[in-house]
Amino acid sequence: MYTLSGVTKRYTRGKSTVDALADVDLTIEDGGRLVIQGPTGGGKSTLLQMLGGLDRPTAGSVELDGVDLTKLSEAKLTKVRAQNIGFVFQSFNLIPTLTAQENVETALVPLGGRPAERRRRAAEALDSVGLGERLGHLPSEMSGGQQQRVAIARALVKQPKVLLADEPTGNLDESMRDEVMEVLETMWKEHGLTFIMVTHDSAIARRAPRLATIRKGRVTITENAAA
Amino acid sequence: MFFTYLRRELRRRRKAALVVASGLALGIALVIIVSSVSSGMSKAQDKVLESLYGLGTDMTVTKAAAAPGSSSQRPRFEFDAKGDDSKQSSDRVMVQGFQTLSSTTVDKVGKQSGVADAVGGLSLNVLKVDGQFKRGEFKQNGNAGAADQRGPGGGGTTQPQGEVQGGGASFDVNSYSVYGTDVTKQDLGPLTSSKITKGRTFKATETDAEVAVVDASYAKEKKLAVGKTVTVSGTKYKIVGVSTADSGDAAANLYIPLKQAQTLADAKNKVTTVYVKAADSQQIDSVKSAIQKNISGTTVTTSADLADTVSGSLSTASDLATSVGKWLSIAVLVAAFLVAGLLTSSAVSRRVREFGTLKALGWKSGRVTRQVVGEALVNGLMGGVLGIAVGLAGAYVVTAISPTLTAQLGGSGGGGGMAGGPGGMGGPARQAASKSLDIALTAPVSLSTILIAVALAVAGGLIAGAFGGWRASRLRPADALRRVE
Ligand SMILES: Nc1ncnc2c1ncn2[C@@H]1O[C@H](COP(=O)(O)OP(=O)(O)OP(=O)(O)O)[C@@H](O)[C@H]1O
Ligand SMILES: [Mg+2]
């Protein structure tokens, strides 16, 4: 469970300062699903960075299962990311020189274990997103939708508690968008994850049971019981 | 994963890797070529010095230069007109340089501290005049006149020849050099720079035997061979061996036992040169000053002193190799290291999102840095292999072409044919006055050069890795979300 209180992130560039997040309070239940939307520059990605332990807020605390991420050492925070948090990025962020299977393996590298076991689990994860036949393909040899599915396999192969996705369909055309959304929803249901996703897609936002809207660093929550 | 990732990166981004590697390769190749050429140069220099000294000699002791004008011993020939058509022959034996030391000096030098061994030798010049005489006067051919006459086969020792034709006389004048060697101590002195190619060398018992070793090119010229005899000033010497000089230029035409040489030149218990081997090659200068201080009237010449008098294209080239070559290769190496570092660093900049993503996935900063350093190190080693290959090829080409360098010894350069013609010519290289040698340049690559090249490759890789690794270590996991590459 996430508990955020008074989270502020201030960026200073020269003399001008921007509060990308301003005094944000937020709780997200285990196994919950939160969709984040808002205008460009509103602070969506910044919030995701705080949740994922990619960066530290200027003020406030970010607790994951009772552990304040903002107070952890860099090494401990790295460990939390390695074990508990899966990321999916808008532009896939696959390593271009590695094959699909090797890309998925990179998520298991910090956890140790035997290479053979790592390869087996990577193959399994790729199989579960429907890419069992493409283990040896390079990112450049795959479509955008396939690449994003590799990225989803990479995020989930370590069986994290949390899946964070920043506009996972933002770089995809319509047909691939559905293919990726379908995979993400299945995964969420099967793994019992806490799933937090930033999206610009209003259709997706409308269907979301819980919606966070961020404007100028301020969050408003909308519950949608009907969805 | 480390090696898989490394391999994939190097294979799929081979162009970038090749640029870094070839930059380093250029620097390393240059270092190999320059250092092998300059070691070839110093080998050539050693050869030049060796041809004068013999192997293992650290310095020579000669009599200090006398005041100019003591040319009382200029050669003079006396012939009697015995009537028409009678053939006459006269040998005039002169001590080379006209300056001698007493044999006791050899013992004195040997007793100086730091001297491992000292041996004396007597260098002679023999002027041989053959011909028919009616009436007339022989006028010695001037010093410069016969300067450029050389024996065939590249032998450099000058052979002044002159002809006298006055009043019906017809004479041939020949000059050759004789070296009286101490047969009891044969591991020091000029003969050590020659190999006995036929027959044998002197026996230690032949201290006063009438035997001779003849230099191969002189033997060829005069049709001498083992078993034949050669007559010097009326004494017949049995030829027991033929020697061939390592550098192609012999110290003397004929070698005979020291005592025989002393008798011929009427120089009993005299030597021209004492050859000295120091106990410690690092202590040569102090041994030199000890000898000079304790034994008055002597000039001590070390290899270093003699090397200073070497001029000609060899010394020019060797100066060039040590100064320009050294600085050039250092400059290229530094530039190559810098370029490799900057290229690696900029390669990391282009992969900000990639490394940010790995950090976001939970890769420790150290693991990412290690990956970058590993790539750079392999680039460096590739550069090393390439550089060693190019360097070896370059050194091989130099050796294959083996350009000829000439070395002039004795500085002053003049063409004085007869050593020490005018009395008091002096200088440390009196005996070597105006010796000119042709030496083929080689570029031997030593194992230590290769090891240095490997070390440079590793260093280059590490420097490049340090640039890139520093850059990579400063990336934040949030860089995974960076939009611009
Ligand atoms: N590293 C940074 N340095 C300075 N300012 C930043 C930095 N990252 C983000 N910002 C600023 O913080 C604000 C919020 O940025 P953020 O990326 O969170 O917006 P976003 O809602 O994700 O926008 P988009 O929909 O375009 O992705 C913006 O005004 C942005 O310019
Ligand atoms: Mg964003």
Image (spheres, rainbow, N blue to C red):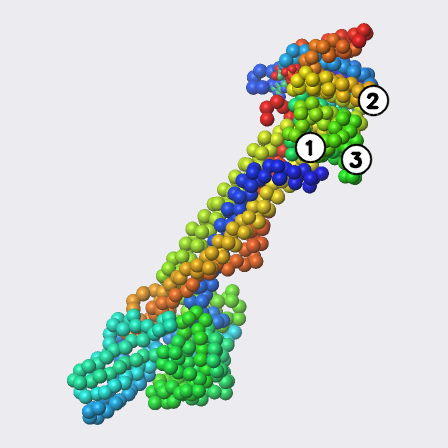
Disc number lying in front (2 or 1): 1
Numbered tag placed on residue A120 in the rendering: 3
Q: Are marks 1 and 3 on the same chain?
A: yes
Query: What's the chain of the residue with tag 1?
Result: A
Please report whichever mark, 2 or 1, sits nearer to the chain's N-terminal start. 1
Q: CA distance from mark 3 to mark 2?
A: 20 Å
Crowding near pointer 1: few (<14 within 10 Å), some, many (20+)?
some
Q: Which residue is mark 1?
A: A137
Closer to the camera in the image, B482 or A216: B482
The reply to whether residue B388 is in sight is: yes
The reply to whether residue A53 is in sight is: no
User: Farthest residue in the bottom direction?
Assistant: B82
Label 3 element class = helix
Q: Residue at x 67, y 23 (%)?
A: A144
Q: Residue at x 60, y 33 (%)?
A: B348
Q: Amino acid at mark 3?
A: Arg
